[in-house]
Amino acid sequence: MLDIHLRATLRSPDRTFALDAAFRSEAPRTALLGPSGSGKSTVLMAIAGLLPGAEGHVRVGGEALLDSARGIDLPARARGVGLVFQDYALFPHMTVEENLRFGVRRLGHALAADTRERVEALAAQFGLEALRGAYPRHLSGGQRQRVALARALATRPRLLLLDEPLSALDTELRIRLRAELAEMLERVQVPTLLVTHDLQDVQALAQSVVRIEAGRIVA
Amino acid sequence: MFTPLWLTLKVALLATLFAGAAGIALGWWMARRRFPGQSVLDSVLLLPMVLPPTVLGYYLIVLVGRNGLIGHWLERWFGITLLFTWQGAVLAAAVVSLPLIYKAARAAFEETDGRFAQAARTLGAGEWEVFLRISLPLALRGIGAGLALSFARAMGEFGATLMIAGNLPGRTQTLSVAVYAAVQAGDDRLALSLTLVISVVCVVLLVLASRLLQAKH
């Protein structure tokens, strides 16, 4: 399902970071577990097509999104990969509904009736109907997470990427939302790769785990 | 008294339009890219803010005058003359107000979080769409403030305007030039009323600009 080998060198003024991570997974939900600074979020960015200069290959369900050897490097917008950012990155100038529709309504095109219905059904499924007109700044942490997840799923991605999905929340909320998130992921049935530093997230959310340290996968 | 006011408003509005389009595009480009010589280009774009307006006016005459590099070409192919016309005043005002909108737009684009653009890309948006639906709306307050400042600066433009467009009452005599002419002619009453008009308009614009900058998402 997932076949990944990524190489990249990241240079900042104070350090150079070499990423060379290869792994495969057939599980519906895989966790990439590692301490902060291990490069796990970088892997996610590279899979989404947001890391310029990444080499290697990214295959999802047999389809190559990146394959340096064959000169394939799809831009982020063409990868069909849904990414939920650590702090959700909801568009602050758009309502919940506008956020949800962003990925399905292209500029200058009207929203097709069946797409509208699908997004509305998704909003209902995530309990967001009452919040459709609200702006992200008025939402709670849990609500933001649901909007971010629904926004990514609205485009019907072939792969869902979650970057530290629970770290933006305080401890008490985290325990409650972990269960909620597990249930939502179980329901939507989209292949998922999630990044976390928390073993409890792995146990609750994933069937398979890959460990990463200092830019390399460790057994 | 109203002819110079309308002329000034027309010139300032058009100048802000041109400077705004160029300044927003340049600000966006400079905020996104890193290339060698960038700080030099940045300085050149800010130059009209610090150069004496007469020097700027002289540069413009060299460029768009009848025998100028661009002026020669404009006249030959399009029959356009900028010297001693109100269109020339628009050019002068646009050049002096460009740094204000460019600086404001660049800062506004640099302040907006890059992750919003990244999120938009993963949701299928191309670069134009990212600009129109994400970057521009998020930077709009800063850009609005920059536009208000540009407009105020364009309204008050004197030195470069005088050198390019001259002082032709009813044709190129803007408010600030008219004030100068009135004082030279000893017409204190006219000078005073013109001064009051331009002061009130500028205060209103500055208040507007600071309101825009203070209001946050």
Image (spheres, grey):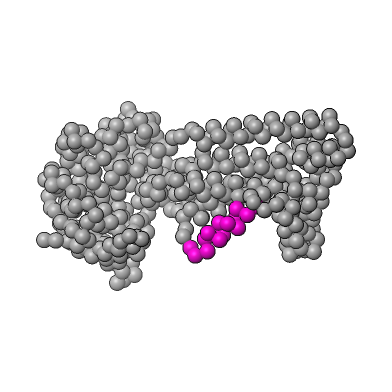
Give the residue at x 75% y 48%.
Answer: B159
Reply yes or no: does residue B174 show up in magenta. Answer: no
Residue at 72 percent of width and 34 percent of height: B198
Coordinates of residue B34 in the picture (x, y in percent)? 46, 60
Q: Is residue B39 magenta?
A: yes
- Looking at the picture, how far across and down is residue B28, in whole percent? 51, 52
Toward the right, the furthest residue is B185
Q: Position of residue B123 (x, y in %)?
A: 36, 48
Question: Magenta stretch mostly in which secondary structure?
Answer: helix
- Residue farthest to the top, as pictured: A130
Question: With respect to residue A101, does A138 lie above or below?
Answer: above
* Position of residue B166 measured from the top left corner of the image (x, y, whole percent): 82, 49
Q: Is residue A194 left or right of residue A77?
A: left
Residue A180 shows in the view: no
Query: Residue shown at 39%/41% (left/top)?
Result: A91
A72 up-or-down from A84: above or below: below
A171 sits to left or right of B85: left
Q: Is residue A88 visible?
A: yes
**Magenta stretch in the rendered image:** B35-48
Query: Is A144 or A64 nearer to us in this picture?
Result: A144
Residue B16 in which image quadrant: top right
- Direction from residue B10 to residue A177 in the image, left or right: left
Instruction: Please give left or right for residue B36 compared with residue B9 in the image.
Output: left
Q: Quadrant of the C terminus of chain B?
A: top left
How many numbered circles does the render carry? 0
State the quadrant of the N terminus of chain B: top right
